Image: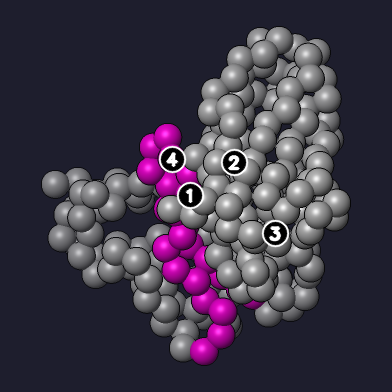
Amino acid sequence: AQSVAQPEDQVNVAEGNPLTVKCTYSVSGNPYLFWYVQYPNRGLQFLLKYITGDNLVKGSYGFEAEFNKSQTSFHLKKPSALVSDSALYFCAVRDTGTNAGKSTFGDGTTLTVKP
Amino acid sequence: DAGITQSPRHKVTETGTPVTLRCHQTENHRYMYWYRQDPGHGLRLIHYSYGVKDTDKGEVSDGYSVSRSKTEDFLLTLESATSSQTSVYFCAISGPAGLNTEAFFGQGTRLTVV
């Protein structure tokens, strides 16, 4: 079975400060890991993914995430937050040992960036 | 945006009635998914499809059925709607490789069961 935990329901940061949104996962095989963002009344949009290779992954809008196998984590980061980054963020995992590419999503973290 | 369209976008229905939601894609992707989004629960997988007429259950499939007779269409049916099925429903597609490709989501269908 695969699972994802986003331990923080809410993250608040000031504009210009670095931000981190946390994600930990559990899989039986090797993970494929994804981050998505959701703006109000919209579907989820893909931000970045880790499949293999470099543990530091860069994605859209200046976001990056670091895969840490020993800590089973895939935290989302950005060096300097913008007010427009305020949204709901989801981490997702796929176990490479399963079929059909089923993803399991975390419960989401609401990021609020204040001016 | 990926070519994925959900219809209807909003629906209010009465308890006990059947409801069908449609997901249409123009990307020719193999995998299609139906999720529901509820506060405090994130996205939960209802059913998914890995090809025409190939479907399987997700984690919250009770009370739902699906059909995929064509690559481009994936239908979700609530056989007899209940108030607990009030939710926002999202369709997603991924492929062609499936496992290592990200999902693209539709705009969602807000369903209210009264």
- Residue A46 in magenta stretch: yes
Q: Which mark is residue A44?
A: 1
Distance between mark 2 and mark 3 Cα atoms: 14 Å
Percent coordinates x, y for residue B50 in the rendering:
77, 59
Q: Chain of mark 3?
A: B
Labels 2, 3: front one: 3
Residue beneath the point at 66% across and 35% down:
B22
Magenta-tinted stretch: A31-53
Eyeballing the image, is A61 above or below B73? below
**Tag 2: amino acid:** Phe
**Within 10 angstroms of label 4, few (less than 14), some, or many (20 or more) residues?**
few
Q: Nearer the viewer, residue A30 or B61?
A: B61
Q: Which mark is residue B90?
A: 2
Co-location on one chain, circles 2 and 3: yes
Percent coordinates x, y for residue B25 in the rendering:
60, 49
Labels 1, 3: front one: 3
Q: Chain of mark 4?
A: A
Circles 2, 1 touching at the beta carbon (< 8 Å)? yes
Circles 3, 4 touching at the beta carbon (< 8 Å)? no
Q: Chain of mark 1?
A: A
Residue beneath the point at 54% across and 23% down:
B10
